[in-house]
Amino acid sequence: MTTSDEAVTMGHIATQPQASGPANEPPFGAMLRGALVPMLCTAPVIVLVSLLTRQARGGLAALLGAVIAVAFFAGGLYAMKKLTNANPLTLLAGALAVSQLLSSTPRTVVVAATPSATVAAASTPAVTPSAAILTNDTVAARCAPQMVKYEAIHTNSYTPFPHPTDGWVVAHEAFAYHEGDFVALVERGRDSRQMALCRIPPAGQENAEVPYTAFDPSNLDEAGRIMLCSEELQNRPTTPTPGLASRYQTTDLRGSTVVASDMADRTGVLMLRLGSGEFLCNLFPVESLAISENVTPLLVQPPAMKPYARGTAVLDTGSTYFSAAGWLPASAASIEFSVKGAVVHRVTATTDGSWVAAWKVAGSATLGDATYTTRSASGAVLATGSVN
């Protein structure tokens, strides 16, 4: 405990003014001395060099520059010393006034780029497809309005197309579908090889028009073409059975890569590879639904000059569409096709010799009218023959 006398003594010590140390000298004199000495040492050298290199006018200019620099610097320090010694608060008030003036003046400031948080703009968000997997019933319901346009297509008597008695169902029941995907639908309960294609719309956009041309391979990117090939893949049971399980329990090709591809107008042909398996896919306009089973697995076979797969299709009046595929041996670099003696198409083999070809000619033609010629990298003819 402290006595009252001690408390008084402590209070007196705490409140009495402390002896101040030596006053801090303003730094302006030291700043002037620190800059003036080097200047006085270098100025004669600068004047002499200018006098020798630029004659008298150069020497006078250097001397004048040195005098102005010393006078300007010394005058500025002298003015600052007078202001701070007179009233430091006056200097502070002036600095604040200048700061306020600068802050209220529009100006452009360039700063170094630094990472910053992204702030979302206050705008209406665009409708984007959902990443959620849709149930098959949801897919069929959303695609129902798109099925109406198929009423104009009459393919054959086996499948009254469309007007399915029991409605539409997803053909590849085991596949996972999202908004924006292509999906094939078939008549419920039928072992049908005829499919109707739909692009799954987002919720609320079921009635948006999706024309047949939306499925043309020429209007799709590579991922879209692979998706169509995957939907058109079917098994070929020797004895059809009721239901869809036997025909549409197929491999999902959407994860495959394109080995080779070629386009001709509204048609296309692709060679796909998934794991160790390869598939050949012919894509046609939706209106040509009579052309079915256009995707087939490929058997591994040695390279040969002659195309192992070929076909024709008539999609519009006055034209014939050809497709072919094969593997070329290492000695061959390209294969060209002629129809009725005229060269109409040429393709280059991939690094492993794979190739596919699609071309269109005017008028009516058959495979018997088409011939092929394989060439080496130098253009030399290696083999010729009939495509058929």
Image (cartoon, grey):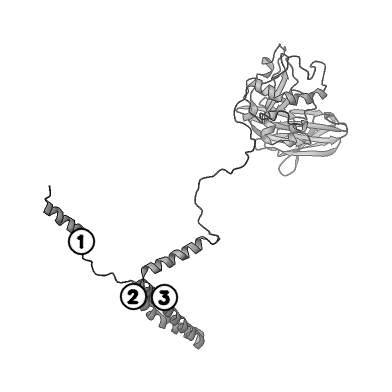
Report the mark closest to the observer, 1 or 3. Answer: 1
Quote the CA–CA distance across marks 2 and 1.
34 Å
- Mark yes or no: residue 291 visible: no
Task: Estimate how packed mark 3 is, as few (under 14), some (14 to 19) or many (20 or more) residues with alpha carbons within 10 Å.
Answer: few
Give 184 or 333, whichever is nearer the viewer.
Answer: 184
Q: Residue at x 36, y 68 (%)?
A: 88
Helix, strand or loop status at disc 2: helix
* Residues packed near mark 1 inside 10 Å, few (<14), some (14 to 19) or many (20 plus): few
Q: Which mark is residue 29?
A: 2
Residues under labels 2 and 3: Cα distance? 12 Å
How busy is the neighbourhood of tag 2: few (under 14 within 10 Å), some, or many (20 plus)?
A: few
Front-most of 355 and 20? 20
Q: Position of residue 1 (x, y in %)?
A: 12, 47
Residue at figure coordinates x 40%, y 76% from the top left: 79
Classify mark 3: helix, strand or loop. helix
> In terms of image quadrants, where is residue 384?
top right
Mark nearer the N terminus (2 vs 1): 1
- The residue singled out by tag 3 in the image is 76
Residue on which the image places disc 1? 16
Any mark on residue 245, and which?
A: none
Q: CA distance from mark 1 to mark 3?
A: 40 Å
User: Which residue: 81% across, 39% down?
Assistant: 344
